[in-house]
């Protein structure tokens, strides 16, 4: 239990160990701890920020979705309206076209009728002249009797609706 | 396990004897150094330095490979100790010093390791040493008052150094002479009071650690004398002693920080 040179030996050992610890051991360890602490703190902050942004984005997406839904409804309505408009318009156009076609057909029929009637009249006039020539036994001068023939033709014309 | 032919007293005295070497009449002699200041306790020095090197190797390896990313288990354990010491220093010591935290870490882990040698069954290492011809072996360095006193005195020197560095010679002198009664007539009284308080620091620091571990070792030795009954008792005392081992290492570190922090503070 004596105090002896062990005291000095231990003091030297302690100085060396503490110096070694101070130079080699402590700085890298505490540096690593501090850097990791900072990284963790940054990570937590980033995580919170991300979460906040996510919540905001979710909120924004809901608004956008609602708007889109509304727009879709509007578009559908518009499309319906436009569709029915188109149908109505097409109906009108078709109706007009039909009427036009009918009118055209009627005109053509009337033209055909007139042409046929003219033809018939000429043939009847020719037949009447031929008949009259045979009856009279001589040539009839068509020029000399043109007035007569025209009158006859007019008479035939009058009688035509009854026949035709 | 008292050996045959030895009384219980001999057994205990033998186990509390350091392996000492000194020069006597021009020759190196073992264990005949009573009262010789130039003797060295080889066993205390050996285990103290061995454990110090174990501490520095372990922590130094981890420190060299320390990663900022995900740490391994060993690194986590080391970092817990470092973080604990760092926090203790930060809470108590408010100045800025690159020395105090590493000093506290070294003292804490080193003293802890030295105390921990107390849990090695008392006959193992001395018995093994006896087989190779070493007559005495005390395996717990902190049961040697030289070891604890050396550390406490080193701390004391640091306390004086920082007191003078921070407050100047005059400030330090004023602290010793003008407290607690700030009057010129009270200077001698103050000086005696403060001087005793100052000297008491290293003495209490070293003797507290020494006394606790010495008593613990003594009780282990007494238990070892009980034959087969030593087994449960040894276990119970070892469990309790584990607390003392940790606590004394912590107290030694904490008081070192407190003393150095007081040295840095202006009154």
Image (cartoon, rainbow, N blue to C red):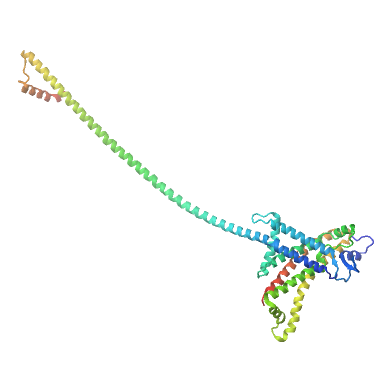
Residue B233: give x, y in percent of width and height: 84, 61
For the N terminus of chain B, which image quadrant?
bottom right
Marker count (numbered) = 0
For the question of whether residue B248 can be seen, the reply is no
Q: In the image, what residue occupies the spot 72% across and 87% down?
A: B185
Name the spot of residue B31 as percent of width and height, x first: 89, 66
Q: Residue at x 72, y 73 (%)?
A: B161
- Residue B34: quarter of image: bottom right
| Foreground pick, B187 / B157 | B157
Residue occupying the point 23% across, 31% down: A104
Q: Which residue extends farthest front?
A: B26
Looking at the image, residue B45 sits to the left or right of residue B166; the answer is right
Vertical relation: B23 (above or below) A71: below
Residue B130's spot in the image, x, y percent?
89, 59
Residue B253 x, y percent position in the rendering: 73, 67
Who's the residue at 73% across and 74% down the image? B160
Q: Can residue A57 be seen in the rendering of this structure?
A: yes
Q: Which of A83 and B107 lies nearest the eye of the viewer?
A: B107
Q: Is residue B165 left or right of residue A144?
A: right
Q: Is residue B49 left or right of residue A69?
A: right
The extreme left residue here reads A144
Q: Is residue B147 left or right of residue B93?
A: right
Is A44 or B70 nearer to us in this picture? Answer: B70
Residue B209 location, quadrant: bottom right
Considering every residue shown, the one lying at the far bottom of the view is B185
Asked if A135 appears above or below B68 in the picture, the reply is: above
């Amino acid at each position: 239990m004596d105090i002896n040179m062990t005291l000095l030996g231990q003091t030297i050992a302690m100085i060396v160990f503490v110096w070694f610890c101070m130079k080699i051991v402590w700085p890298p360890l505490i540096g690593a701890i501090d850097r990791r602490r900072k990284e963790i703190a940054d990570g937590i902050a980033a995580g919170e920020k991300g979460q906040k942004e996510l919540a905001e984005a979710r909120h924004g997406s809901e608004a956008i979705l609602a708007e889109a839904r509304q727009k879709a409804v509007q578009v559908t309505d518009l499309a319906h309206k436009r569709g029915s408009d188109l149908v109505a318009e097409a109906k009108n156009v078709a109706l007009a076209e039909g009427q036009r076609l009918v009118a055209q057909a009627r005109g053509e029929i009337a033209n055909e009728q007139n042409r046929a009637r003219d033809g018939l009249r000429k043939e009847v006039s020719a037949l009447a002249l031929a008949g009259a020539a045979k009856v009279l036994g001589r040539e009839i001068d068509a020029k000399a009797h043109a007035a007569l023939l025209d009158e006859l033709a007019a008479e035939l014309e009058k009688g035509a609706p009854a026949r035709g | 396990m008292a050996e045959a032919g030895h009384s219980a007293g001999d057994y205990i005295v033998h186990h509390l004897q350091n392996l000492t070497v000194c020069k006597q009449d021009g020759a190196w002699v073992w264990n005949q150094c009573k009262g010789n200041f130039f003797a060295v306790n080889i066993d205390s020095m050996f285990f103290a330095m061995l454990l110090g090197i174990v501490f520095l190797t372990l922590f130094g390896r981890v420190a060299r490979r320390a990663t900022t990313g995900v740490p391994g288990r060993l690194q986590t354990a080391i970092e817990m100790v470092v973080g604990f010491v760092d926090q203790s220093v930060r809470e108590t010591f408010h100045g800025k010093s690159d020395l105090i935290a590493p000093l506290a870490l070294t003292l804490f882990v080193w003293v802890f390791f030295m105390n921990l040698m107390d849990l090695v069954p008392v006959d193992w290492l001395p018995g093994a040493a006896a087989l190779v011809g070493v007559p005495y072996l005390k395996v717990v360095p902190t049961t040697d008052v030289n070891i604890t006193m050396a550390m406490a005195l080193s701390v004391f020197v640091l306390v004086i150094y920082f007191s003078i560095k921070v407050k100047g010679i005059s400030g330090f002198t004023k602290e010793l002479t003008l407290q607690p009664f700030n009057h010129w007539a009270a200077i001698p009284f103050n000086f005696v009071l403060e001087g005793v308080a100052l000297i008491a620091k290293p003495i209490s620091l070293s003797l507290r650690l020494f006394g606790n571990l010495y008593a613990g070792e003594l009780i282990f030795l007494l238990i070892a004398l009980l034959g087969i009954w030593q087994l449960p008792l040894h276990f119970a005392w070892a469990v309790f002693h584990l607390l003392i081992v940790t606590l004394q290492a912590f107290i030694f570190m904490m008081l070192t920080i407190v003393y150095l922090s007081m040295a840095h503070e202006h009154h």
